[in-house]
Amino acid sequence: MIRSVCKKREEVRVTKPNEQPWRNWRHVVKLDPDRPLPENLLDALRESGTDAVLLGGTQRITYDNVSALLGSLRRHVPELPVWQEISSEDAVVDGVDGFAIPVVLNAGDPRWLIGEHVRALLKYRPFIDWSKVLVEGYLVLNENCAVAELTEAQTELTPDEAAAYAVAGEALLSMPVIYIEYSGTYGDPATVKEIARVVQNAHIFYGGGIDSYEKAAEMATLADTIIVGNALYRENWREVLEQTVRAAKST
Ligand SMILES: CC(C)=CCC/C(C)=C/CC/C(C)=C/CC/C(C)=C/CC/C(C)=C/CC/C(C)=C/CC/C(C)=C/COP(=O)(O)OP(=O)(O)O
Ligand SMILES: O=P(O)(O)OC[C@@H](O)CO
Ligand SMILES: [Mg+2]
């Protein structure tokens, strides 16, 4: 009986350590498919030393704008890994190097903890190569960002509470990545430090408000990977790119 049940199981590929390229990422650029890029940014990425690009945003993400941005990246920087951070099941594209799937640990609306994921699995499950999937346990900590509003995230957390969410993600839910998300504002180093202290094996992404060498260096000493988004859409994007990569690689 047991054997026949086992035979019926589909083969699920488990990711091996050498299939976790994100463990080597120190600096990542997050590009929003909904926003026009500064001229020459993509060419500058080629020489920048950044480790990967995440395609992601919260609002107005469509199949067409993700495909267009992916196409531009492949033309200008063919060697740079590009991962799609899925925020809408209708915008999933083919041809990326991997998929990052956010799960918002402190979501007030459970859709963003598991509901949307189940809906997407009903559609994509037979076609998924799980070795290309990275689950990100998001901790959304800036109450004034689009993702906090969408997910109704409980952002008022002490460092101890934030760390408990991170441990829940790592130890209870076996998440490989904990993403400390302050999108749009620079985070509280004490909170990031406490999370880094208690998390044992999960890889820590930090994102939010990084626009200088000093901020990048501070967060890069606490987190495994820093993610730079909004500041790349400003006039001084060249300086931001150069300084934040240099900080991430030298700390
Ligand atoms: C080709 C093929 C068959 C591929 C298979 C695809 C695949 C691997 C499918 C997996 C199925 C699956 C489980 C998909 C997930 C579906 C889904 C919609 C899940 C919900 C994700 C989620 C919690 C979204 C909420 C928003 C969020 C966390 C977005 C992440 C990006 C982010 C925070 C961007 C920051 O942007 P924003 O807040 O807009 O910041 P600024 O405006 O300030 O810049
Ligand atoms: O846009 P910023 O504030 O740099 O944040 C980066 C990233 O964490 C957003 O999801
Ligand atoms: Mg956005």
Image (spheres, grey):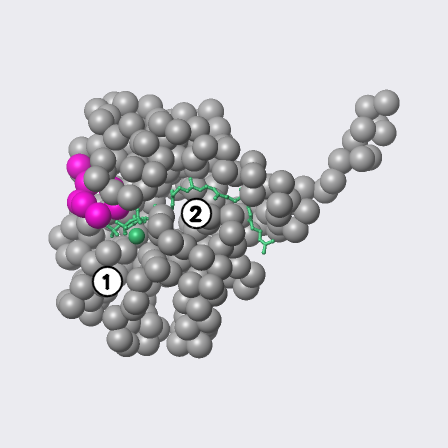
**Which residue matches tag 1?**
232
134 falls in the magenta region: no
Up-down: is 219 above or below 165?
Answer: below
Residue 200 percent across, percent down from the top left: 38, 32
Quadrant position of the N terminus in the picture? top right
Is disc 2 placed on a helix, strand or loop?
loop
**Which residue matches tag 2?**
87
Other residues around mark 2 within 10 Å, as few (<14) / some (14–19) / many (≥20): many
What's the amino acid at mark 1?
Leu
Up-down: is 183 above or below 192?
Answer: below
Residue 109 percent across, percent down from the top left: 39, 29
Q: Is mark 2 within 8 Å of ligand 1?
A: yes
Instruction: Tell me the magenta residue range.
Output: 182-188
Residue at horizontal 20 percent and vertical 66 percent from the top: 237
Up-down: is 183 above or below 148?
Answer: below
Toward the front, the furthest residue is 60
Residue at horizontal 50 percent and vertical 38 percent from the top: 116
Other residues around mark 1 within 10 Å, as few (<14) / some (14–19) / many (≥20): many
185 falls in the magenta region: yes
Q: Of the two numbered discs 2 and 1 on the same chain, state the one appearing first in sequence.
A: 2
Q: Is mark 1 within 8 Å of ligand 2?
A: yes
Q: Main secondary structure of the magenta part?
A: loop
Up-down: is 235 above or below 14?
Answer: below
Residue 181 percent across, percent down from the top left: 29, 41
